[in-house]
Amino acid sequence: AEAKPAPAEMPPPSNELSVDAVAGAKLTLFCFSWSPRRKYDEGMLHEVRKQYKKCDGHLFFTDTESPVKQDEEDFQRVKVPEQKNPRSHGQWLYHRNMVGLMPAWDYMLHSDISEKYDWFINTEIDHFLSPRRARENIAAYLRVMGEGTKEEQAQLDGPIMLMWGNAFVFNRKLMQAMKDNWKKLNVIARSDSSDAKEAKFVGCPMFMKGRTEWPDSCSQDIIYPTLAMNILPPLKVKVAFPGAPGCGQPAKNRKGKEYPLGCWEMQQNPIDGESEAGELQAIKELARMSRTKEKFEAKAYCKSSKIKGLEKNCLKFWDGRNVPVIHHLHAVSEHILARHLLDNDLDH
């Protein structure tokens, strides 16, 4: 019988620094996340923390009723209004992340955090985040804005929110604008309201009244874009919001030049979807692409590969070659492999 071809070895990471990597290395980044500290989250937390420690500062936020008795020093508890679903319910704050994030923002805006860093990124526990790649991607986004229209170039001096799927990146000027308008923005729906819909919206920001998801949910991936596009402009805050609010979606500046991908979506993984084996293979392919210099080389590799679905979806992996965020990681093994291969951070 013919011997099966051995899998090609992974090329080494390149030592060459791109223009964006050089510019990105000068930026300071604060990373924050909300976690109800469910068992599922806790399993991932050890790995997520390893990545967050590569940020220039970071905090995980949870609520005062968190089931964990003793918080680590990088956890901050905030008061969350009582919800219709009890705290122990599996669907507590389901699609209502902003109920936890509003007090988290309140904490950040009332501390010196909002003035200490250049950029701030809000990710989730099921995201893989590479802070090094995030800094590089921020620099790339600023470069592509600068290659855009006169209006886009002018926006480089103002408040900016980068949309990387359901991870969002804010510059210091946007944090300042939030701080200046916080009294108006931080009006929260109350359970004792005489308006039944408002009572149902408890804990969610009232600027979403009558808008998307009202009165059932308040997800951050709906609220952040609404803030930038609809809520802040009438308050005389013009926000630039390049990127795409859907993970895995491409984005261009107004001259048609592409922004690099901000978020790679495992739900769109053409190699066995969200199965553990499929996600691990996808991470390997993204790593290989990050070590491939030219698109034609990537296509040649995909064509010769025995992996089902790769040739047809080659550009999906090529486009994700420098992606800073991967969404829907379900196993610790996936976080570990992403850290090893995409961040060149091995356990010694």
Image (cartoon, rainbow, N blue to C red):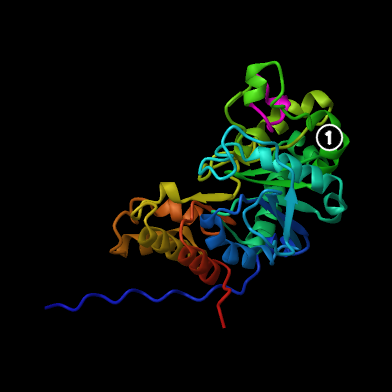
Q: Is residue 261 left or right of residue 268?
A: right
**Nearer the observer, 234 or 253:** 234
Question: Residue 269, how many percent across, how many down?
Answer: 40, 51
Task: Check disc 1 and give the amino acid type.
Answer: Trp
| Magenta span main SS | loop
Residue drawn 81% across the image and 38% down it: 178
Q: Nearer the viewer, residue 57 or 101?
A: 101
Determine the secondary structure under disc 1.
helix
Image quarter in which the C terminus is found: bottom right
Farthest left residue in view: 1
Q: Indicate yes or no whether the magenta region holds residue 131.
A: no
Residue at horizontal 56%, vertical 53%?
A: 38
Name the side, left or right, on which 150 lies relative to 111: left
What range of the chain is rendered magenta? 201-210
**Vertical position of residue 205 compared to residue 145: above or below:** above
Above or below, 235 against 331 in this view is above
Q: Nearer the viewer, residue 195 or 96?
A: 195
How packed mark 1 is, by other alpha carbons closer than 10 Å (few <14, some 14-19, many 20 or more), is: some
Tell me: 2 left or right of 132: left
What is the quadrant of the N terminus in the image? bottom left
Is residue 261 visible in the rendered structure shown here? no
Give the residue pinned by disc 1: 182
Q: Residue at x 79, y 31 (%)?
A: 185
Q: Is residue 233 visible?
A: yes
Q: Residue furthest bottom?
A: 348
Residue placed at 62% from the left, 51% from the top? 35
